Image (cartoon, rainbow, N blue to C red):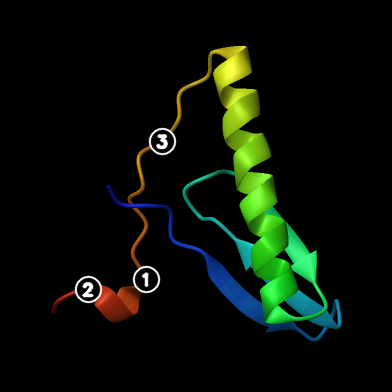
Amino acid sequence: MSDYHINIFYSEEDQGYIADIPDLQACSAFGETPDEALREVLEAKKLWLDAARTEGKPIPSPRYRPAIYEVA
């Protein structure tokens, strides 16, 4: 089973790390370290998926792949 891709990057504006899951609309989190941002976004993913199930909304399949993995 594949899982959702997670991006983690440093934000000068926020002075911390942002983690997001592109396949899950508006699913992102902040942390002072990359590890903290990852822990937070994993919790956000769980809550996002739980809310979608509760509301009967569709859950997208993992599709996002960074350009670095695309074959030319």
**Position above or below: 34 against 59:** below
Q: Residues within 10 Å of mark 3 (few under 14, many from 20)?
A: few
**Position above or below: 61 against 39:** above
Q: Which residue is mark 3?
A: 60
**Position above or below: 22 against 65:** above
Position of residue 35 measured from the top left corner of the image (x, y, whole percent): 68, 76
- Judge from the rendering whether residue 4 lies leftward or rightward of residue 43; answer left or right: left
Position of residue 37 measured from the top left corner of the image (x, y, whole percent): 71, 69
Q: Residues within 10 Å of mark 1 (few under 14, many from 20)?
A: few
Q: Which residue is mark 1?
A: 66
Most foreground residue, 44 or 70 = 44
- Judge from the rendering whether residue 5 lies leftward or rightward of residue 10; answer left or right: left
Q: Given the image, on which type of amino acid does mark 3 rest? A: Pro
Q: Residue at x 36, y 47 (%)?
A: 62
Q: Given the image, on which type of amino acid does mark 2 rest? A: Glu
Position of residue 31 measured from the top left corner of the image (x, y, whole percent): 79, 71
Work out whether mark 2 precedes mark 3 in sequence or the reverse, and give the earlier one.
3
Dots 1, 2 in contact, CB < 8 A: yes
Q: Residues within 10 Å of mark 2 (few under 14, many from 20)?
A: few
